[in-house]
Amino acid sequence: MKEREILAKNPRCYRQSKGMLQKDLAVKVGLTSDTICKIETGKQNNIGMKYLVSISRELVVELFQLFMENPESLTIKFVVSDQNLRSFKRLLDGVVKRLDNKISLQILKS
């Protein structure tokens, strides 16, 4: 997927998941509804960093998530000692289950 397609898809998905209209987001970040529409369709060429930061803040996501091909699937790596490995794994397995397996878990021994 091209970068512009990714940057079009992600803000739209996050905005829709929050039940927010394009015009609502536009007002909050200081853009026009037309510009938000262009961003979400991949037709907006130069999006300033100031506006990308504002969009991510209003959508309550990290800025890097706007650029990820699959932002809902993150890999988190932890390094733990042998002594704490079992306890840590049980704790994180519970977290993964609560997140409906939307993250993968890899534990590396130190």
Image: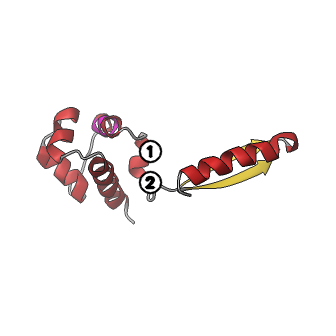
- Look at mark 2 in the image and give the residue it sits on: 68
Percent coordinates x, y for residue 37 in the rendering: 17, 52
Residue carrying label 1 = 64
Amino acid, disc 2: Met
Reply above or below: 24 against 101.
above
Q: Secondary structure at mark 2?
A: loop
Quadrant of the rendered image containing residue 49: top left
For mark 2, does the 10 Å Cα neighbourhood hold few (<14), some (14 to 19), or many (20 or more) residues? some
Q: Residue at x 31, y 50 (%)?
A: 17
In the rendered image, residue 43 lying in the magenta stretch gets the answer no
Q: Looking at the magenta stretch, what is its main secondary structure?
A: helix
Q: Nearer the viewer, residue 18 or 106?
A: 18
Q: CA distance from mark 2 to mark 1?
A: 7 Å
On the rendered image, what quadrant is the C terminus found in?
A: top right
The N terminus sits in image quarter? bottom left
Q: Are marks 2 and 1 in contact (CB under 8 Å)?
A: yes
Q: Amino acid at mark 1?
A: Phe
Which of the two residues, 97 or 64, is positioned nearer the viewer here? 97
Residue 5 shows which numbered tag?
none
- 103 sits left or right of 85 in the view: left
Quadrant of the rendered image containing residue 23: top left
Q: Which residues are magenta?
A: 51-55
Q: Position of residue 26 (x, y in %)?
A: 18, 40
Q: Nearer the viewer, residue 51 or 95?
A: 95
